Image: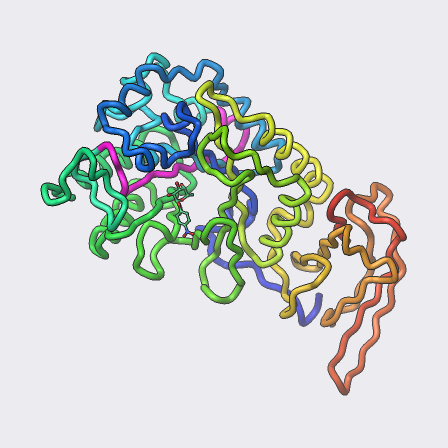
Amino acid sequence: MGEQEVHKRSDPATAWWTDARFGMFIHWGLYAALAKGEWVMYADKIPVREYEKLAGDFNPQQFDAAAWVQLAKDAGMKYIVITAKHHDGFAMFHSKADPFNIVDATPFGRDPMKELAEACREAGIVLCFYYSHVIDWHHPHSLHKEHNNTWDYNLAEKHFPEYWEGKAKPQLKELLTSYGPVGLLWFDTAGGLSEADSRDIVAFVKGLQPDCLINSRVSHFIGMGDYVSKGDNEIGMSGEDQRPWETPMTLNQSWGYTTRDQVWKTAEAVIKKLVNVIGKGGNLLLNVGPTPEGTIPELSAERLREVGEWIRRNSDAIYGTEGSPFPAELEFGAVTTRPGRVYVHVHNDKWPADGLVMYGIRGEVSRIYCLADPKKKELAFRQTVDEALDLHVLKVELPAEPADEHVTVI
Ligand code: JFZ
C-alpha cells in the first residue's frame, strides 16, 4: 500500500487478542435452571436460602467441554470467556474460598472450568474468565453502587473488605493458579468500587499472571484495563481511545439461558456485525447461554457454524488484520488490512454491480480477486490519479453476482 501502509498495533501484550478478532462469550450458571436470564435472583428477589436450593438440583450431565470448544472452533472463534462467577455469587469452579460452588454444592460434582481448560489447551483456544468482582448477591458483604441484595441483607451492616479479602480476591487467586494461563479476566459492573480497590485488583491479577489481560469494566475510573469493553452491541470508533476495544454481543437478546426470548439474529446479521466491528479495529465477543443440562442451544449452535463456514472462506481478511485506514465509512460494507493487502467486505445486498469505487489507495495495485473464489479469478480494474487534487481513484469491475454468501470479500 506504499505511503498508505498501516502499521500493526505495537503492543505485544495484547497482540494475541487483537489478532484473534472473534471470541465466544458464555453465560452459564445456576440461573440457567430458571430459564429467565442471569439477573433472575435480583429481579425476583429470590432469598439466598431459596436460591441455594437450585444447586441441590443442578446436574448438567450433558456438559461436554470438548464439544463446546469444538463449536467455538467451528465458529471461527479463537478464545472463550466464560462466567466463572456471575452476580449470583455461585462459583462454576471448585472453590476452597466459598462452598457455594459447583463441585461442593451440586450433585454434578465436577469442575467445568477444569474440563474447559484442558479442552481449550488441546484445541489451541485461549481460555478466559468472567468474574463479577463487585456484585455478589449471595455474599452478605458485597456492596455495589445500586444493585445489592437488600432482601436478605441490611446495607448498613455491610463491610466490603470482608467480601473483597474474604471471597473476591481468594477466588481470583484460585482462577489464576489452578487452570493454567488465563488469557484475560473479564470484570463487570464496577459501580462504587474505589480507585484504590480498582488498582488493588489489577495489581493482584498481574502479580499472579502478568500476561493476563484485564478489560476496562474492572473500574469506573477512566483508562484502567488493557482494553475497552463497549456496551452491548455498541461499536467503538477507532481513534477515540488508544486502547484496543471489543463489542460484546448476544445472539438473541439475553446473556443467560432463557426460554422467553426467541428473537435470534441470523448468521448473515452476525457476519455483517463482525465485519463492521473488525473494520473499525475492534473484536467481537459473541455470547451463548447454555442450558441447565449443559448444552449450547441448537438455535445458537447452528448460527455459529454458519458464521464459521463464511469465516473459513475469508480467514485472510479477518485474523491478524487491522481496521480500515480510510476516514470515511463505506456505505456498502467494511475494510480490513494487513501490510500489502486491502480487504473490501461488500454486503451482498448492496452489491455495486456497475463497479466498486475506492478512494485514497495511493499505492499501485497489482491484482484484485474475490477471496471466496477458489480460482482467484482476477477482476479488471483501473487506477487514476489527479495529482493536483491529490485524488486517487480505484475502479474495479465486479462480477454480476456476488461470489460468496451474505458478504463478499474482494
Ligand atoms: C453486564 C451484566 O450485568 C450482564 O448480566 C451481562 O453479564 C453483561 C455482559 O454485562 O451488563 C451490562 C453492563 C454494562 C453495559 C451493558 C450491560 N453497558 O455498559 O452498556
Name the residue at the bottom extreme: 388
Q: How many marks?
A: 0
Q: Position of residue 117 (x, y in %)?
A: 43, 27
Among all residues in the image, which is located at the extreme left? 157
Rendered residue at 80%/55% (across/down) = 351
User: Residue 362, position in %: x, y?
Assistant: 74, 72
Q: Examine the image and state in which quarter residue 50 appears.
A: top left
- The answer to whether residue 404 is magenta is no
Counting from the top left corner in percent of width and height, residue 269 is at 65, 45
- Observer-nearest residue: 275 or 261? 261
The stretch of residues the image draws in magenta is 119-138
**Coloring scheme used:** rainbow
**Residue 143: x, y in percent?**
20, 44
Determine whether, in the image, residue 64 is placed left or right of residue 298: left
Which quadrant holds the C terminus?
bottom right
| Left or right of 324 in this view: 163 | left
Residue 37 visible? The answer is yes
Identity of the residue drawn at 48% across and 38% down: 254
Residue at 51% x, 50% y: name it: 247
Q: Is residue 283 above or below residue 150?
A: below
Horizontal placement of 368 versus 328: left or right? right
Q: Which residue is painted at 39% across and 15% down in the image? A: 59
**In-front residue for pair 73/142:** 142
Left or right position of 195 against 212 = left
* As drawn, 175 above or below 348: above
Q: Is residue 79 visible?
A: no
Location of the N terminus by quadrant is: bottom right
